Image (tube, helix red, strand yellow):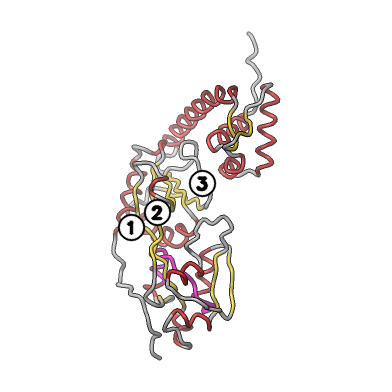
Amino acid sequence: MAKPPLLPTLDFFRGFDAAARHGSFTRAAEELHLTQSALSREIKKLEQEIGTALFERGRRGLELTQAGETLHVTVRNVLREVAQVVAGIRARAGAHRLTVSTTVPFASLWLVPKLARFRSRHPDIEVFVSADNRLIDLERSEVDIVVRFTQAARVPQDAIRLFGERIVPVASPRLVRRTRLRRPEDLSRHVLLHLEDPLARVPWLDWEMWLGAAGVQGVEPSGNLRFSQYDQLLQAAIAGQGIALGRRPLIDHFLESGELVTLFAKRYDVPHAYFAICTTSAHGRPEAAAFLDWIVAEASAPATQQVTPRTRPPSG
């Protein structure tokens, strides 16, 4: 019997496919949780084993060569078929397990506090929440439901819009009681809490943008605190360490509990929204349908109590 031909490792083909789809080693490496240099080395090794270049630098960036285009057609189809077969086997082996991928703020502030209600209705469904702000490939990922904060034009047609975000300044009621915060200009007397956003994923969550939208100039805060994660920033606000830009409805349970209060009348809606997406491998699975029905109902439900903006400090 003839030996099968030697092939490069499967990881090389996954890296090649990601680079071909994105037209960028950097974005492909981000999808695969690799460094850009590691992915470049894999592509170089693949080209050496095949014996020809697969990419070239063009005027529009990274482009496939003719050999690369020919290879990508087959690699794309094979990887898709393998992913679908594996997903089907996993679905049959663990029919009641559901993997939900979403962003870190949505998971920690909105989804996790509500999950007990889903579990009470569907105790037989095991939910795994995978919180990661990086992009994933819907066709090749190992998730069933994806919730992402993005523009409507960037999601599949069958994506379900949950809600948008409204940005409003918030603070601890203890901080508000002991100081003066009647108008945005009063922010000059306070510490402002900032989210570090080097990739500009949420550019509207920025004090300069909010002050500009409010028509306020010349605000010089008494200090600044910066955080890499939004839930850390909120904990600092709850502790009275400064004033934050709140993301409603993600922070509504803090408003309802009285841990935070809204300030001023000025707020603005952002151009993105949260969308729920069922991956191809999860279509038709009853646990996926149950979760989608539940999360849509939760997103549409009114708050347990009316939360209105506070424009003057509480008395006392």
Question: Residue type at mark 3?
Answer: Leu
- Of the residues under marks 2 and 3, which one precedes in the sequence? 3
Earlier in the chain: of badge 1 and badge 2, it is 2
Which residue position holds label 3? 135
Residue located 65% across and 43% down the image: 36
Q: Quadrant of the C terminus?
A: bottom left
Q: Position of residue 291 (x, y in %)?
A: 35, 49
Residue ID for mark 2: 274
Label placed on residue 299: 1
Residue nearest the observer in this picture, 290 or 214 = 214
| Residue 21 percent location from the top left of the image | 53, 35
Asked whether, in this view, residue 24 is left or right of residue 120, the answer is right
Q: CA distance from mark 2 to mark 3?
A: 14 Å
Marks 1/2 in contact by CB < 8 Å: the verdict is yes
Locate residue 110 relative to residue 226 in the image: left or right.
left
- The x and y percentages for residue 211 are 47, 72
Q: Which region is colored magenta?
A: 238-254
Residue 71 to residue 132: above or below: above
